[in-house]
Image (spheres, rainbow, N blue to C red):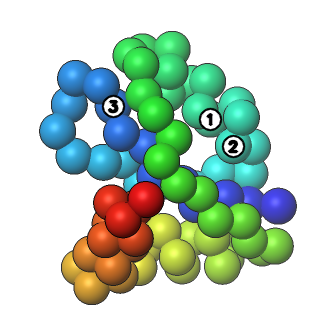
Amino acid sequence: MYYVYVIKRENKLGYYIGYTNDLRRRFKEHNSGQKCKLLYYEAYLTEALARRRELKLKQFGGAWRSLRIRLTEK
């Protein structure tokens, strides 16, 4: 299983988007430097699908904009 995730670091503006095959380990790595909050994640069966989604969120403003709207509606 592969995951695309969005985190927010406490003392920084903006968000971090990434992908991993071990979400718990990766989140611990992010938290070791400074506190952060896991805002969102999606699960994928293949690495190729996860990488494609990560790139879509990073490169295409519309995909990230619509996800950000969904995150702020909660």
Q: Position of residue 59 (x, y in %)?
A: 29, 76
Q: Is residue 64 above or below residue 35?
A: below
The location of residue 26, given as percent across then percent down, is 62, 35
The answer to whether any part of residue 24 appears in the image is yes
Mark 2 nearby-residue class (10 Å; few <14, some 14–19, many ≥20): some
Number of the label disc, if any, that sits on residue 9:
3
| Proximity of marks 1 and 2: CB atoms separated by less than 8 Å | yes
Is residue 39 or residue 45 the one in the foreground? Answer: 39
Q: Is residue 69 above or below residue 30?
A: below
* Secondary element at image label 3: strand
Q: Is residue 31 left or right of residue 59?
A: right
What's the CA distance linking mark 1 and mark 3?
A: 14 Å
* Residue 23 tag number: 2
**Point 30% across, 48% down: residue:** 15
Q: Check if mark 3's residue and mark 2's residue have beta carbons within 8 Å.
A: no
Kind of residue at disc 1: Arg
The Cα atoms of the two marked residues, 1 and 2, are separated by 5 Å
If you read the primary sequence from the N terminus, does the residue marked by circle 3 or circle 2 appear first?
3
Amino acid at dot 2: Leu
Residue topped by disc 1: 26
List the single residue furthest toward the front: 74
20 on left or right of 61 = right
